[in-house]
Image: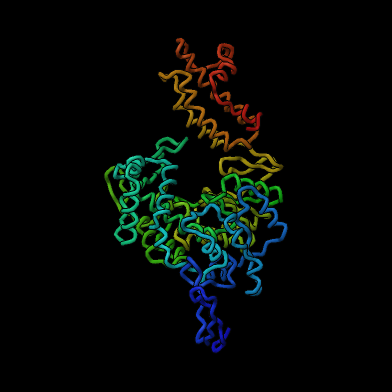
Amino acid sequence: MDQGDLVVIRTWANSRGRQEVRAPIVVAKPVKADGAKGGRKANRSNPQSKSTMEKYKRRKPAPNQIKEELLSEEVFYLLDWHQPSTAEEIPNQAKSQGEIPNRWEWVEPSVWNTKMLTTLERGVKGGKWFSLIDKVWKMQNLRSAFKRVKANRGAAGIDKQSIENYESNLEENLQWLSQQLEWGTYQSKPIRRCHIEKPGRKHETRPIGIATVRDRVVQTALRNVIEPILENQFAEKSYGFRPRRSAKDALREVRNSIDQGECQVLDADIQSFFDEMDHEILIGKISEHISDSRIIDLIKMFMEAEIDDAGTRHTPTKGTPQGAVISPMLANLYLNELDWLLASEGSEMIRYADDFVVMCDKAKQAEQARDQIEEWCEQNKLKFHPDKTVLTEVTGKQGIDFLGYHIRKNGRHWISNKSTKKFRDNIRPLTRRTSGESLETTIEKLNPKLRGFYEYFKHANKYGLKGLDGWVRMRLRSINRKRVGRKGKGHGLDHHRYPNAYFANLGLFSLEEAKRLKL
């Protein structure tokens, strides 16, 4: 339609019927996409931003590869993208509006309606989203955010306000929070830092940041708004803390790569990744996709929130607190460029947060990948750990440890030694011989940990599970032995005094039995 053409404008004149008015077109203005606050870009189908795609072009997947991805568990919703040759291809390739929610059904519906999701898939002009802050302070979004915060439970922050206390006056609290966000007067409170002991490492602790309930609600509402935008940029082989993805998906991908002959594996390590992320670089990566200055300022506020460590306060200049709601999402964004860089060079990097391996056919390719990772870390102000980075050829006699499993060739995998040690370190405090609790109470406390451990490691071979079962029963026999005046660990005749059936009758969860029953 050109300037000067006539267009028919139909209007309704009360009950007399339809009237037509013919008027010349003076100028044709581009239509803005609903919800995007910006024009749609007709030829954008690849989730990578223009700047990134100029550096790293994504390879078009083979049809059978797409089919396999669609059939894979928990990963089917993230399809491979390809660049159409013409703008006219897009209407045929894009998902219909009725199908889009199936792919994005995990998003917050009060924020992401069908029109916005359509825009998300087609892309916005310039690849950047504007005017998103009003969706953060939306009351429906804040209510949904609180439900998630409540489901995750968690301790009180620096203000000592519990979730239950916040909920007792929920509507008023959320309404006030919404107004503060709208007026621009919202200020985050300091983060309470606590230290938890690392399993199996005495005198070593991991710092965890605990934000206040109100701040966790705002962070969750913020994540509800920006996560789909960032999720649309992430590489296929990134699995950590992403919707409908899990550590088991990453393990399955490693297993498949080894079966296909990619047995030269680079296990790389980045020192203190969450503590070393550069704020300026991270904000730059966010700004490639989001241009709402108030959203950017809100993210900055959370990254620069004061840390209260046993009364001593400081303002961080880098890193993001472990335990913060938005930290995993920001970590994935920070490493996303590295994912695409290695993929563009033909290396397959399988990543779960900051834990990743690079699968290669040849040792030389793995060495080149190591050099690329080291160079990229230097450019992005991260510290590459050369001592903990190992190149291993996976065979039937040697393998790699990844996400708690030890993996070797020919489909062999079992619980890693490190995971076994962590398991025992977690069980020991509950099974001390000096415990004054009844055996029934001890077993009641043990069972949730045993079930959780089995849920993750149920794909390991039965012999490792059987050994851990025996070790747990030995600890319980030692408790009974102590109570009748005998010293030492449970052994020998204790197996006859307290057979396996004795503990089964008390309700002890058995890892081996669960494996046999395929629970």
| Image position, residue 158 (x, y; %) | 30, 45
Residue 48 visible to the viewer: yes
Residue drawn at (42%, 35%) of the image: 202
- In the picture as drawn, the residue positioned furthest to the bottom comes out as 4
- In the image shown, does 357 or 143 lie closer to the viewer? 143
| Image position, residue 6 (x, y; %) | 56, 86
- In the image shown, does 85 or 285 lie closer to the viewer? 85
**Which coloring applies here?**
rainbow
- In the picture as drawn, the residue positioned furthest to the front comes out as 16
| Image position, residue 290 (x, y; %) | 45, 65
| Image position, residue 365 (x, y; %) | 64, 58
Determine whether, in the image, residue 31 is placed left or right of residue 397: left
**Hey, which quadrant is residue 54 in on the image?**
bottom right
- In the image shown, does 435 or 261 lie closer to the viewer? 435
Q: Quadrant of the C terminus?
A: top right
**Hey, which quadrant is residue 84 in on the image?**
bottom right
Residue drawn at (63%, 70%) of the image: 90
Q: Is residue 325 above or below residue 61?
A: above
